[in-house]
Each structure stands twice: as structure tokens, then as C-alpha cells.
Image (cartoon, rainbow, N blue to C red):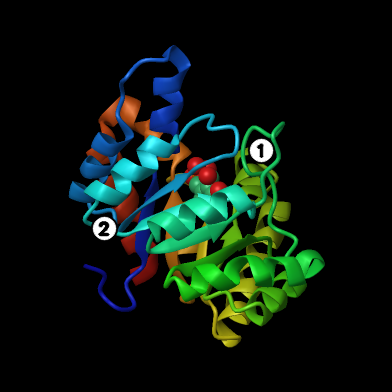
Amino acid sequence: MNTPGKLRLGVNIDHVATVRNARGSAYPDPLRAAFLAEEAGADGITAHLREDRRHIRDADIEALMAGLTVPLNFEMAATAEMQAIALRLKPHAICVVPEKREERTTEGGLDVAGDEKRLADFIAPLRTAGCRVSMFIGHDRRQIAASARIGAAVVELHTGAYCDLHHEGRFAERDAELEALRAAATYAHSLGLEVHAGHGLTYDTVGPIAAFPEVMELNIGHFLIAEAIFRGLGPAIAEMRRLMDLARAA
Ligand code: PXP
């Protein structure tokens, strides 16, 4: 399945469910998208069950757990409700994300340093259940150190600001953000954390992140589902995979 050292691609299928829910229809089916993603070379499938169920729903997570042949990365907020669901389903990986009802997407990283005791207690049973727990954080060293202290196996670095700066043409600030992400990846790796990255990545922005040697996995969703409108989901994913491999090899 996953070659050691290979940069993995996790395909986030949340926005297949967004399209479905926009009309209250039964289609498009996120599980069908997940199967296509598997065929196109996804190493894992990522889905975020939000408190408000705006895209992925409980039944989608159940169907993914039952049907996938690649690992599921279950994104969730640090709430008692989500912990109970995760402990029942025991997905391969859990990415703990901050969640605000009014946000359009996950805007920032978790404040692990400011909520250390609660998050340590929160992830302890998930770790005991055998799930690989990841903390979705910004590039702040304090958040990385706190993630290591609470026993997370993985940190996922939030690439949203870097991508926004790129698409706004603010290249000097983008480059500074990229350097901060690079330093964060190195620091996290030095603490023994596995490093993932994601949010907002596109064909234009994936290369420099994929080139960080410490990064083991990218989780990409919105752009791939959008690009699938034009070239189909399989080809959209295959092109992302190609660009990741190209950057990695350079
Ligand atoms: N990683 C995490 C932790 C996320 O919350 C998201 C968005 O759900 C992504 C990656 C993927 O972001 P995008 O959909 O912008 O590619």
C-alpha cells in the first residue's frame, strides 16, 4: 500500500458531500468518489465530520469505514460527541481540528499549547484505541512542542495562509510563510513527530510543500473536487500525484 518514505496523498472528499447536500439529493455519493480516488492513486481518504454536518454525515463515515481499502483519516473537533464516534469506529487516523460554526472552512490551527491538558486527556483514549492521532496546527513552534508533549503521533501543518498569499500575488509574504512552514516541518521531525500538511493546496502551490523532505502526507480536497468538474476526478488526482512526485524528486 504505502511505500516507506513515499509522499502520501490523502484525498479529502468533503465537498462531494457539499454538492449533494446543496440539493438534498442522494448524489453525488462521497463513497463513489472515494473509490475513484483510490483507483487514481490516493493513499488515503480524508473526511471531516463537522458538528453541523454541513457536508459529510454520520452515514458517510460509516460507509467509508465499511468500504474503503485505503486508510481513513477522520477529521474532527475535540468534542465528546466526536470522541465517542471515533472510539466506536476506530479509524486508522484521526486529525483533530479546530471548528467554529460560523467559519467557511477550518481557518486556523489548533491552540494545543493553550489547551494542553484537555487535549492530552482527549486524545489518550484515541491513542489507546490504536488510532494515529494528528494535530492540525500552524507553524508556531509552541504548538509543535505541545503536540509532541501530549503524545500526538503526527502534526498536520496548515498551508492555507501560504496558498492564499500565493493566489493573492503577495509573493514576498508567501515566501516568508513557506520558510516558516519549512522550519516547522524540520522542528516537528526533530521531535519525532510525523509531519503532514494541507489546506488550500492547488497545482500551483503543491510543489514547494511536497519538496519538504520531512513531509510524509498531503491532504487535499477542495481544489481536486473543483478541478474534477473540468477533467474528471481520476485525472485531477493523477495530475496532483504527478506534481507531488515531480517536486519530491527534484
Ligand atoms: N487538512 C485539514 C486538517 C483540513 O481541515 C482540510 C479541510 O477540510 C484539508 C486538509 C484539506 O483542505 P482543502 O479542502 O482546502 O484542500
**Closer to the eye: label 2 or 1:** 2
Q: Is 126 above or below relative to 104?
A: below
Give the structural element (helix, strand or loop) at label 1.
loop
Q: Amino acid at mark 1?
A: Glu
**Mark carried by residue 168:** 1
Sequence-wise, the earlier of marks 2 and 1 is 2
List the residue tagged with mark 2: 70
Q: Are marks 2 and 1 in contact (CB under 8 Å)?
A: no
Q: Residue at x 22, y 41 (%)?
A: 36
Q: Residue at x 36, y 37 (%)?
A: 60
43 relative to 24 in the view: left or right = left
Where does residue 6 sit, x and y in percent of width and height?
Answer: 32, 72
| Visible residue check, residue 200 | no
Q: Quadrant of the N terminus?
A: bottom left
> What count of labels does the image hold?
2
Q: Quadrant of the C terminus?
A: bottom left
Label 2 neighbour load within 10 Å: few <14, some 14-19, many 20+ = many
